[in-house]
Amino acid sequence: MGPKEYIKDVLTDDLPLAFRVKTLSKPIEEVNKKTFVEVIKLLKEINDRTEFMATELGMDIVGYDDKFFQAIEGLMRIAFNKKQVLLIEMYLNDIPMMKENWDGTITVQVKEEEIQIAFETPLDVWNAIQRFN
């Protein structure tokens, strides 16, 4: 028995009414945003783990992780345009190096206008790359 049938059975046991149970799916944009944020968080954790192992344990595992990152970057190039991929790579690779003297924003040129946008969290990155669809 699926969730819809279970809910309907429970409600019909308690309520002598006729009704239908309808499920609504989330908009694809919301699903894509959630998935993107989760993937970027995981990639940051992998980067942090790799850095920790290199600095604290003296183990360089970049050679092992490198193939995975190449595959992931290839998939990103399929899903995103060049500007979007550059922003994602900047967030994952360059921003962690500038944390001390950084105000959490970047300046991007959208059409003819330069704008300053937040760029501290994976959600900020999602919002930034959406400007370049």
Image (cartoon, rainbow, N blue to C red):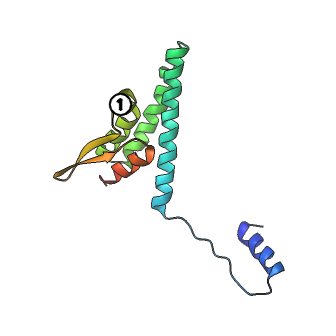
The reply, left or right, for residue 70 in relation to residue 15 is: left
**Quadrant of the frame with the C terminus:** bottom left
**Quadrant of the frame with the N terminus:** bottom right
Q: Name the spot of residue 129 as percent of width and height, x first.
A: 34, 49
Q: Name the spot of residue 89 as percent of width and height, x first.
A: 37, 36
The reply, left or right, for residue 15 in relation to residue 63 is: right
Q: Residue furthest left?
A: 112
Above or below for 15 versus 130: below
Q: Identify the element where label 1 is drawn.
A: helix
Residue 29 in sight: yes
Q: Please give the name of the residue rendered at 41% of the width and 39% of the height, measured from the top-left corner.
A: 74
The reply, left or right, for residue 54 in relation to residue 117 is: right
Q: Please give the name of the residue rendered at 29% of the width and 44% of the height, measured from the top-left corner.
A: 83
Q: How many numbered marks appear?
A: 1
Residue 60 in sight: no
Q: Residue furthest top?
A: 58
Above or below for 105 versus 17: above
Q: Quadrant of residue 96?
A: top left
Three-letter residue code for mark 1: Asp
Q: Name the spot of residue 11 as percent of width and height, x first.
A: 77, 77
Above or below for 127 versus 101: below
Q: Quadrant of residue 99?
A: top left
Q: Please give the name of the residue rendered at 40% of the width and 41% of the height, measured from the top-left corner.
A: 120
**In the foreground, 84 or 102:** 102
Q: Which residue is mark 1?
A: 94
Q: Please give the name of the residue rendered at 33% of the width and 29% of the height, measured from the top-left corner.
A: 101
Q: Name the spot of residue 22 as percent of width and height, x first.
A: 64, 75
Q: Residue furthest right?
A: 13
